[in-house]
Amino acid sequence: MGSLNKPHAVLVPYPAQGHINPLMQLAKLLHLRGFYITFVNTEFNHRRLIRSKGLNYVRGQPDFRFETIPDGLPLSDIDATQDLWTLSDSVQRNCLSPFRQVLAKLSSCSECPPVTCIISDGLMTFTMKAAEELGIQEVQFYTTSACGFMAYLCFGGLINRGLVPFKDENFMINGSMETPIDWIPGMRNFRLKDFPTPIRTADPNDIMLNFMKEETQNCLNSSAIILNTFDEFEHEILQAIAAKFPRNIYTIGPLSLLETGITTGSCQYSCTVWGIGMEVNHVVKCDEVEALIKEMMEEDKGKQMKKNALEWKKKAQAATSIGGSSYHNFNRFIKDVLYGCK
């Protein structure tokens, strides 16, 4: 297929390494399946990519190109770690306009095919507005587990029930974190302490709390959602998410295995559902860690955890092998959503 006749996917990761890597894995898979790829980094992360991989890497392969957008923050040391609170606020406020400019550049490019779809990180939902303006398909890719996605979807419920933000700064020591949460479908034995850390604030204007609530909720306005997990790993929660989002959900993970052919969620799920983790109190003490390591290495519980981890590894490999659920879902995603949008 000539380059100009290929479907053209634009991929936009949230500008943090744990988000860039999974989306790059997806980009490579789509490229192997005949897609023209444009991968959009922030200028800050693109400079870091050049330094770590070299210019030849970012010049791309045939039909695989990189573009950049500013993150809206002042220039900083390339070795610095960007503050996620400030970065998230800036991305939400400032990235839509430069992203429109990238799409306009691609539209006028005589050497690349027309953009047919946008796949963006679930924290970069400003891309949906740009896709709507162009009348093209937009897909949200959530890089964490399904239970993590569901937990973020429930931030609004926690706020509406007056559970967060907390009343004062003593929430870590007054027992508030042990409050049971029994109204989330598919998530049993959950406590406030089991939710992602953005809830741990007493500030109603906390940037990350509101950013995660808004961006995750915005995902439900997309035409499709990709989750980096596999069906058997989180079956019950996936059913609960499907009830909230009755359109297309595609579980095509673990992408690291699909690319060569695990996703973890909250501490609570690793410990009590999947049986592959051990919980440590929020105040970490050396003797407690030492005891847990000894239990993991020498006692029956540790042996069972190792056995569980190996079983999940086998199931993940089966899901991403030819004929497995993630392999099938990836092919279905390409056929139904991406080729279907041409």
Image (spheres, rainbow, N blue to C red):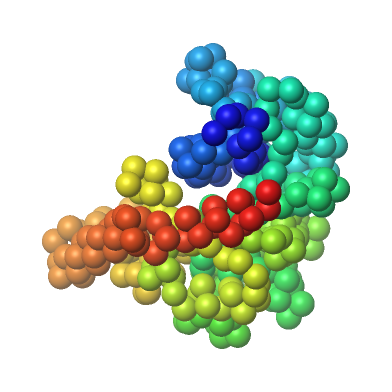
Residue, x 50% and y 75% (percent of image)? 237
Residue depicted at x 72% and y 36%: 114
Q: Is residue 85 visible?
A: no
- Residue 196 position within the rendered picture, expressed as x and y whole percent measured from the top left: 57, 61
Pick the front one: 260 or 196? 260
Task: Answer whether residue 214 is visible to the viewer in this image.
Answer: yes
307 horizontally vs 113: left or right: left
**Nearest the camera: 28 or 200?**
28
Outermost residue, bottom direction?
182
Residue extending furthest toward the top: 55
**x, y percent for residue 274:** 34, 70
- Total number of numbered discs in the rendering: 0
Write the residue at 71% across / 60% down: 222
Q: Is residue 169 above or below residue 158?
A: above
- The answer to which of 38 and 85 lies nearer the viewer is 38
Q: Is residue 132 left or right of residue 238?
A: right
**Residue 272: % across, % down:** 37, 74
Q: Splitting the image into 4 quarters, where does residue 312 fall?
A: bottom left
